[in-house]
Image (spheres, grey):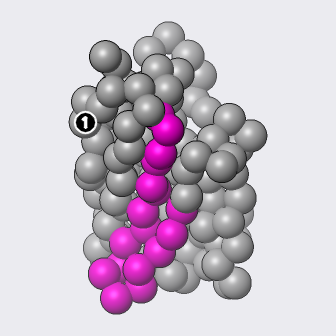
Amino acid sequence: VQLVESGGGLVQPGGSLRLSCGASGFSISSYDIKWYRQAPGKEREYVATMTSDNSNTVYADTVTGRFTISRDNVKNTVYLQMNSLKSDDTAVYYCHAYQYGALIVRGQGTQVTVSS
């Protein structure tokens, strides 16, 4: 089983990026998918969740209203649409798959840099 993130890059403040979290070896719709991020010298920070059962979404206060998590079951991929990006959003973003509260697999991360 594997998760692979992509879509990171360099963007100016106020810009947008869409991160992808593609699954292989399992059906991503059967797992709760969570995005976390970690900036240099800082602890890992929770970002957002897409639940498996009813596709509920939950967001950290720091990203509410700016980020949107979604899922494409055909492509077996979860997305994180990030708008109105700020320098504080600079971090490596990781997607995680959980089942019954247990971490199953984590991706390798994708770098997001917000800078002018």
- Residue 106 percent across, percent down from the top left: 43, 52
Is 75 colored magenta in this rendering? yes
Question: Which quadrant is the N terminus positioned in?
Answer: bottom left
> Among all residues in the image, which is located at the extreme front?
14
Which element is circle 1 on?
strand
The number of numbered badges drawn on the structure is: 1
Between 1 and 43, the one lying in front of the other is 43
| Residue at screen point 47% across, 45% down | 83
Above/below status of 12 relative to 77: above
Q: Which residues are magenta?
A: 69-85
| Residue at screen point 36% across, 79% down | 76
- Residue 46 percent across, percent down from the top left: 63, 41
Between 14 and 113, the one lying in front of the other is 14
| Amino acid on which disc 1 is placed | Gly
Above/below status of 108 relative to 27: above
| Residue at screen point 27% across, 49% down | 7
Q: Residues within 10 Å of mark 1 (few under 14, many from 20)?
A: some
| Residue at screen point 36% across, 53% down | 18
- Residue 42 percent across, percent down from the top left: 55, 16
Is residue 99 at all visible to an observer of this figure? no
Question: Which quadrant is the C terminus positioned in?
Answer: top left
